[in-house]
Amino acid sequence: MTADAKAAGAGTAHPAAPPLTERQEARRRRILHASAQLASRGGFDAVQMREVAEAAGVALGTLYRYFPSKVHLLVATMQDQLQHMHTTLRKRPPAGETPAERVAETLMRAFRALQREPHLADAMVRALTFADRSVSPEVDTVSRLTTAIILDAMGLDGRPTAAQLSAVRVIEHTWHSALITWLSGRASIAQVKIDIETVCRLIDLTAPERAGQDTP
Amino acid sequence: MTADAKAAGAGTAHPAAPPLTERQEARRRRILHASAQLASRGGFDAVQMREVAEAAGVALGTLYRYFPSKVHLLVATMQDQLQHMHTTLRKRPPAGETPAERVAETLMRAFRALQREPHLADAMVRALTFADRSVSPEVDTVSRLTTAIILDAMGLDGRPTAAQLSAVRVIEHTWHSALITWLSGRASIAQVKIDIETVCRLIDLTAPERAGQDTP
DNA sequence: AACAAGTCTGAAACTTGTTCTAGATTACCG
DNA sequence: CGGTAATCTAGAACAAGTTTCAGACTTGTT
């Protein structure tokens, strides 16, 4: 409960973000922390709103004022974790030679991080794909963060082309869906690795100056 | 990939399918029909177990004996619908010239079918991606059906190579995830089309030996 | 300092998925 | 047929997400 000075400062990109007082910010942080902790223990089902409220030291009604549903809460938790991951990944950029290699390497690094907390991954990813329209803005934020991570890994010179953005979208699709199959035990880690590497080859198809990717 | 999914040898899709009496088969059909009907009205949330039971004319306990959870029920519903679609698609095979074109065309046809019942699509796809391990066998069956549809569309001569199967897996990932983004209003129909076409280009990368251009 | 508006708390209530139980029905076997 | 095991029904009961409400507490204003 020590107030760890997390700069965060990530201005919530919402159109009408009401300014939170310090205690409110602290409450929000406690809630997210409790959410992640419970999720780490037992995944989606273990994140029970009453328990989150108790662990965070707030009333149930307050929890719902901050996060209007369990899915909102878990998507916000994912936002939080992704932000961590983004800064972590930035410290050691991928070493691959081609954009495709770098993206695959980055995603595999993220995947390894998720493997360390599979239950947390379960809670976040299930919430993300289960989210309905009422959570779209938040899910979109997560999506933009993911896109940013991938574009970062590609290490482009200028702005990405439309074709590259399409490839990134498809990579994101594959990433989410492959995670789901892994989490539900229908795909092995090796399988996910193959899928990621396979889809990343799409990037090579979209290189602006793709003269001869395959030597004749 | 776990080894528990036996092909059952029997040929029918159900592993260890206990022989159902006629009345039981009828009950099962009534339940699936009620499920699809309610789903068509209001999507995932509109499929309420009590209502399904009532509409199907069975007791709640019986419904749970046939389908041990709402997700099981909806995944079975999807299995049912997919089977329809498979036979429908087979009647008019895609006309594209390359495998990639044919797969894209097939998926777009399926997509158009889903657009006619967006609520039903919502219920089925959300259930599919929300399913946890306890539904893995059923989800796996759906996955195999989808794979079969795609392989059918590719129109291969022999058995698919490992690379081709990887591509198909990635296409499936993209298909599911793109549907999710469309259903939750975060992607337009046009966007989904682009994603499908983009990912289908992966197929061209996996042609066994440049077999497309010059066949001896 | 006092007031008004907004926020937080604690607890109960409501909804819907899921489980359980006792008795009625049905299917199967001799 | 008669009997027995399995299945089905009706309904209560339980679990967890969500809503609601009265009252206590904060915050900002004058």
Image (cartoon, coloured by chain):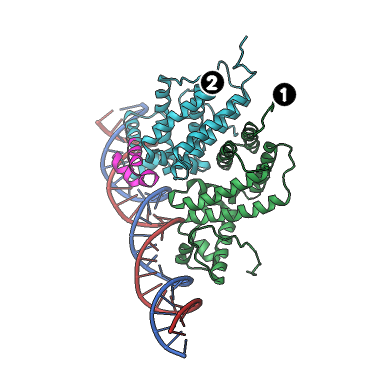
Chain colours: A green, B cyan, C blue, D red
In the visual, does B57 lie left or right of B16? left
Question: Which residue is at 73% across, 39% downward?
Answer: A96
Labels 1 and 2 touching (C-beta < 8 A) = no
Is residue B167 rendered magenta in the image?
A: no
Screen quadrant of the N terminus of chain B: top right
Height in image: A69 above or below C29? below
Viewer-proximal residue among B181 and A73? B181
User: Which SS does the magenta portion mostly show?
Assistant: helix
The chain letter under disc 2 is B
In the orientation shown, which residue stands out farthest toward the top?
A: B216
- Tell me the quarter of the picture where residue B4 sits: top right
Three-letter code for the amino acid on which mark 1 is drawn: Thr
Q: Spatial distance from mark 1 to mark 2, Cα to Cα?
A: 23 Å
| Residue A215 numbered mark, or none | 1
In the visual, does D29 lie left or right of A124? left
Viewer-proximal residue among A142 and A126? A142
Q: Is residue B206 visible?
A: yes
Question: Which residue is at 52% across, 38% downward?
Answer: B136
Residue A111: x and y in percent read: 65, 44
Screen quadrant of the C terminus of chain B: top right
Q: Is residue A46 visible?
A: no
Height in image: B17 above or below A152? above
Disc 2 residue crowd, few under 14, some 14–19, many 20+, Cα 10 Å: some
| Residue B18 numbered mark, or none | none
In the visual, does A181 lie left or right of A90? left
Three-letter code for the amino acid on which mark 2 is drawn: Thr
The residue under label 2 is B98
Tell me which segment is drawn in magenta: B33-57
The chain letter under disc 1 is A
Residue B186: x and y in percent read: 47, 45
Residue B89: x and y in percent read: 42, 23
